[in-house]
């Protein structure tokens, strides 16, 4: 990763780009930075959860999904699917 990223949106966009290019560890760091800038950024929590799930890191995925659900209850259908999958695999 290069460049200076200041806003949660910049970190989030970087994370999505890194993830799309298979650079998962770097993407997780970028999602975490977006969350560090703005702890109530539901999109970053949600997509970080999905990436953890994809990487079979179910405990981390569950924690992130729970936070996303707290912040964005209207996404319940999508988040509950992640939580359910994680529960069966933990």
Image (spheres, rainbow, N blue to C red):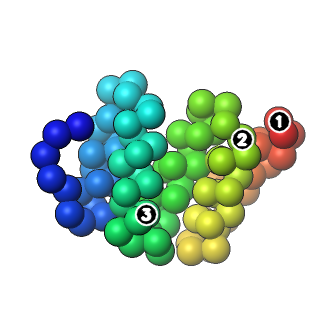
Image coordinates for residue 63, horizontal then vertical, percent: 68, 57
Residue 55 screen position, x and y as percent = 60, 30
Residue appearing at x 65%, y 47% in the figure: 61
Picture coordinates of residue 27 (x, y %)? Answer: 39, 40
Point out the residue furthest to the top here: 22
Residue that mark 2 sits on:
58
Q: Nearer the viewer, mark 1 or mark 3?
A: 3
Q: Which residue is mark 1?
A: 89
Distance (Cα) linking label 1 and label 3: 26 Å
Task: Please tell me in which quadrant of the rendered image residue 14 appears.
Answer: top left
Left or right placement of residue 8 versus residue 41 in this view: left
Q: Vertically, is 62 above or below 19? A: below
Report crowding for label 3: few under 14, some 14 to 19, many 20 or more residues within 10 A (C-alpha).
many
8 relative to 46 in the view: left or right: left
Q: Is residue 44 left or right of residue 49?
A: left
Indicate the quadrant containing the N terminus: top left, top right, bottom left or bottom right. Answer: top left
Question: Distance of mark 1 from mark 2, alpha carbons?
Answer: 7 Å
Whether label 1 touches label 2, CB < 8 Å? yes
Q: Are marks 1 and 3 in contact (CB under 8 Å)?
A: no
Task: Please determine whether, in this image, residue 34 is positioned above or below residue 62.
Answer: below
Helix, strand or loop at label 2? It is helix
Local SS, label 1: helix
Q: Residue at x 66, y 48 (%)?
A: 60
Residue at 37%, 57% in the rendered image: 33
Q: Position of residue 90 (x, y in %)?
A: 84, 39
Instruction: Identify the secondary structure beneath mark 3.
Output: helix
| Residue 53 horizontal side relative to residue 19, left or right | right
User: Camera-side residue: 25 or 68?
Assistant: 25
Mark drawn on residue 35? 3
Q: CA distance from mark 2 to mark 3?
A: 19 Å
Classify 10 Å Cα crowding around label 1: few (below 14), some (14-19), many (20 and above). few
As drawn, which residue projects farthest toward the left?
3
């Amino acid at each position: 990763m290069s460049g200076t990223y200041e806003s949660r949106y910049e970190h989030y966009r970087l994370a999505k780009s890194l993830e799309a290019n298979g650079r998962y560890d770097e993407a997780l760091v970028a999602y975490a930075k977006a969350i560090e800038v703005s702890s109530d950024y539901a999109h970053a929590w949600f997509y970080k959860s999905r990436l953890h799930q994809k990487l079979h890191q179910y405990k981390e995925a569950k924690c992130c999904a729970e936070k996303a659900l707290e912040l964005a209850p209207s996404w319940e259908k999508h988040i509950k699917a992640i939580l359910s999958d994680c529960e069966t695999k933990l």
